[in-house]
Image: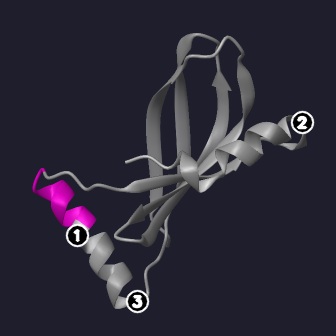
Amino acid sequence: MVPKLFLQLNFQQPSQVGIQSSIGFDTYYNDVLIGSVAGPVTLSPNAVSPLPLAGRLVPQTTPAGIAAVAEVFNNFLTGKDSNVVVLGASAGSGDVSYFAFKFATPSDAFL
């Protein structure tokens, strides 16, 4: 069984234009892909919008992958932060292709 991953985020939409679409993120720790999440999104203009995402932890088969996931869990259990890199993996449909293209570029990574 693949472990499931759920995130409940809030997103500040500074734009005067709202978006109703879907998005997906890949999460990396020490250059190892450790999880992917996706979900529907409605970003209201000039507002904070809930962003419920669901996905899975990626099964690890390499020593580096197993060590990365073990370190994240150990940090969590001991109250330490784990700095992860989150990259946009997917966004939108054909109706909002400009959003999908911009969202999935590596420059949109954040820590």
Pointers 2 and 1 in contact (CB under 8 A)?
no
Q: Position of residue 34 (x, y in %)?
A: 43, 67
Magenta stretch, overall SS: helix
Pointers 1 and 3 in contact (CB under 8 A)?
no
Kindly tell me whether residue 101 is visible in this rendering. Answer: yes
Amino acid under disc 3: Thr
Instruction: Specify which label sits upstream in the sequence, 3 or 2.
Output: 3
Looking at this view, is 70 or 14 the one in front? 14
Looking at this view, is 53 or 107 the one in front? 107
Quadrant housing residue 65: bottom left
Residue 76 sits inside the magenta stretch? yes
* Start-end of magenta stretch: 72-79
Label 2 residue SS: helix
User: Along the horizontal axis of the image, is 111 left or right of 53?
Assistant: left
Q: Position of residue 12 (x, y in %)?
A: 50, 21
Amino acid under disc 2: Asp
- Residue occupying the point 17% across, 60% down: 75
User: Along the horizontal axis of the image, is 23 left or right of 67?
Assistant: right
Number of the label disc, if any, that sits on residue 95: 2
Q: Is residue 32 above or below residue 101?
A: below
Amino acid under disc 1: Glu
- Residue occupying the point 67% across, 36% down: 40
| Label 2: how many Cα within 10 Å (few below 14, some 14–19, many 20+) | few
- Which-is-in-front pick, marks 2 and 1? 2
Q: Position of residue 104 (x, y in %)?
A: 66, 51
Which residue, given by chain and number where applicable, does mark 1 sit on? 71
